[in-house]
Image (spheres, rainbow, N blue to C red):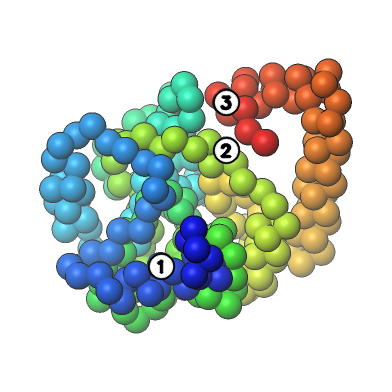
Amino acid sequence: NSTNQYSCAAEALNIGAQKAKGDFFVFCHQDISWSNPFFIEELELKLKALPQLFVAGAAGKCKQYPKTVIGNITQSNPPHNLMNSAIAPITKPFSCQTLDEVFLCIPRIFFEKMRFDEIVCYGWHLYSVDYCLSAIENNIPIFVIPLQFYHASIGASFNNSYYGILKKVVRKHRKKFKKIYTTMGNWVTNPITIRVFILYKQLRNKVKKLFTKNKLTRAIVQAYQKKKYGQIYS
């Protein structure tokens, strides 16, 4: 979207899907790569082995492992795996509640019935999370499938738009879900609790920005980021 042609990811991906061909739509970030020359063929086999209707991805979150991102992909620099050693790597489809936007696969026959929500997801975040929750409400299973590729970004991107969309996603799905598990955090859907938690997160981000203005405190923050995420981000 270098020319600002689209107002949000949901709009851009919906239009892209209208132009796409094939039985499966794959929505992915531009900063991924794989070394397996048969990646696409193996992906197709994995998708055809799933139920007729599904939503599948390369990374996700579930209630069973609330502190762990499920998936075999590596990311950041130096590359590291998302999962902990207790359950990694997965060797078969793993049932999850939501999937990360980094890589998403949806059968054409289902996507033509339910597209990304451009009203709720008015920016560049959480469109996959919202889609997965809507799919579950329509009795469609969500899977992380065993895919191996490299994602250059660390995936940590919180801003006011993220929290604004999060409020809308929570409001849309709170009757069905008491808690939403995402790769960026787990969110209680109680309206008072989520507002307080978002205010806390936003305040913490402001304090972090103040810290980074000073050379010494910036070095401390960067050392923490390096240890937690494997690289430094702004």
**Kind of residue at disc 1:** Leu
Disc 2 to disc 3, C-alpha distance: 20 Å
* Residue type, label 3: Gln
**106 lies left or right of 195:** left
Residue 231 image label? 3
Callout in the foreground (2, 3):
3
Give the labeled residue for mark 2: 67
Callout 1 crowding tier (Cα within 10 Å): few <14, some 14–19, many ≥20:
many
Say which label, 2 or 3, has the lower sequence index. 2
For numbered disc 1, what is the local secondary structure? helix
Tell me the CA gap for discs 1 and 2. 29 Å
On screen, residue 163 versus residue 200, left or right, reads left
Could you tell me which residue is drawn at 32 percent across and 71 percent down? 17
Q: Can residue 7 be spotted in the picture? A: yes
Q: Amino acid at mark 2?
A: Lys
Secondary structure beneath dot 3 equals loop
Q: Looking at the image, do the residues carrying marks 3 and 1 touch, with CB atoms under 8 Å apart?
A: no
How many C-alpha atoms fall within 10 Å of the one at disc 3: few (<14), some, or many (≥20)?
A: some
Q: Position of residue 201 (x, y in %)?
A: 78, 47
In the picture, the disc for residue 13 is 1
The image shows residue 82 at horizontal and vertical percentages of: 46, 33
Task: Mark yes or no: residue 189 visible.
Answer: no
Q: Is residue 225 above or below residue 50?
A: above
Please tell me which residue is depicted at 36% across the width and 41% down the height of the picture: 32
Q: For this view, does 1 lie left or right of residue 189?
A: left
- Which residue is situated farthest in the bottom direction here? 113
